[in-house]
Amino acid sequence: MSNLSRRRFLTTAGTSALAAVFLKGCLGNPPEPGGQTGSTPAAAPIALGPEMTPETTKIKLGYIPIVESAPLVVAFQKGFFAKYGMTEVEVSKQANWASARDNVVIGSGGGGIDGGQWQMPMPHLITEGIITSGNKVPMYVLAQLNTQGNGVAIARIHAGKGLHLDITNAADYIKGFPSSNGRKFKAAHTFPNVNQDFWIRYWFAAGGVDPDNDIDLLAVPPAETVQGMRNGTMDAFSTGDPWPYRILSEDIGHMAALTAQIWRFHPEEYLAIRADWVDKNPKATKALLKGLMEAQQWCDDPNNRPELISIVAGRNFFNIPAEILEPPFAGSYEMGDGQAAINDFKKGPLYWKDDIGSVSYPYKSHDLWFLVESMRWGFHPGYLKDIDSVKQIIDKVNREDLWREAATEAGFTADIPEGTSRGIETFFDGKTFDPNNPEAYLNSLTIKRI
Ligand code: CA
């Protein structure tokens, strides 16, 4: 298929997805989450002895309506939280990451949230007061929600310039922007110093582009970024599913890379809760974790993905057309700009296990990468002084011990990792991160702030 006919085809596909929204709107009866034919029954409550009866049945968990939050929504909607006695969980949609941060500082008692979904290392930064104006709110990282499901999108005006996974040959085109266009190449993420910032920085720097000096990289709301990509004022977007699908189907641009290509089975977003809540309610915390683990297993069963899509797409949750979620949940990505499409379930979002370890278990070695990468870029220099100070923060925040206890009590013993490290990690450009020698990783990098 030629580029032009592919573009026409994709535009048509986008239009029919839009038409479907209007159709549902006219009929006034979009499918109720979990209520369609073929849905599996909700989990039944189990008998809980005194040692497992939670101290409270209530908690308020924030989420952002992107694929990362699917296991939280499913644990709520399919009765997995209730199965373990957490019958009054509230999953609360957050307007954006800054709102989630502000709401967890307030806490549910003040109308905020007790915890929920986070990019990394937000729990560590909130614990230390780094992104909360010095207000330290200790938090515990309890589980990873997912791997993959993110990527780097490029505006369509850059078609044919080689802005794909490896941009070594396109680095001069990007760096030459001030002379060719009178401004720097402009890229956006949704919140500074967390995942989407790290992924696009890694990708730029691997290709020889310094994200702090050669381009403008800033936090911009997604709708504004996409508008900018359409009208030629924004060039790149570090984003998550289902945006990659929309970038192609709405002819906004192409995908340079999926995060599954940059770092296969990389750590993505996490469940973290205020430490004061967890310390007061340890059994309730483990009940939540057991429900989450069951939801993650359910989410990874390909047979459940159609129902998963119908649940999260529903108006109570993401409130978007289900069609938009079908390709990413199948691991199916049109990349555009002459690149082959990707059709690999294992390159889409995964929730329980991947090919090298546990997705749900919060490896301390992954917390370490996020904080070492923060050091690489000179983030929070007053707090992240050296590897030892970073490890102290991780030991305070990461509660993999609670994950292990919950997994043991729930009988998921076969899926409990042996240690707190996943071992040496390998990136697409051949760099490696050995958690036992993070200094060697930092030394191996060419573009860095330390
Ligand atoms: Ca993400």
Image (cartoon, rainbow, N blue to C red):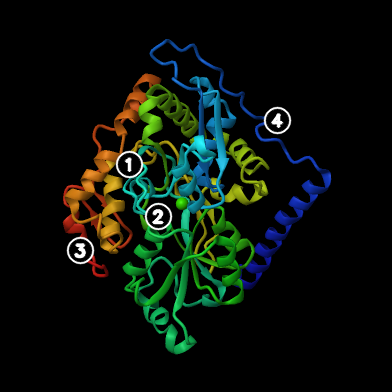
The image shows residue 411 at horizontal and vertical percentages of 38, 20
Determine whether 335 is above or below 279 in the image: below
Q: Is mark 1 within 8 Å of ligand 1?
A: no
Dot 2 crowding, Cα within 10 Å, few <14, some 14–19, many 20+: many
Left or right: residue 391 versus residue 93 is left
Q: CA distance from mark 1 to mark 2?
A: 20 Å
- Dot 3 or dot 1: first in sequence order is 1
In this picture, residue 401 sits left or right of residue 43: left
Callout 4 secondary element: loop
List the residue tagged with mark 2: 195
- Residue furthest out toward the right: 26
Give the x, y percent position of residue 225.
Answer: 55, 66
Identify residue type, mark 1.
Ile
* Ligand 1 within 8 Å, label 2 CB: yes
Q: Amino acid at mark 4?
A: Thr
Location of mark 4 (residue): 37
In terms of secondary structure, where does tag 1 sit?
A: loop
From mark 3 to mark 1, how far is it between C-alphas? 24 Å
Q: Which residue is mark 3?
A: 444
Q: Secondary structure at mark 3?
A: helix
Q: Amino acid at mark 3?
A: Ser
Is residue 98 visible to the viewer in this orientation of the structure? yes
Sequence-first disc among 3 and 4: 4
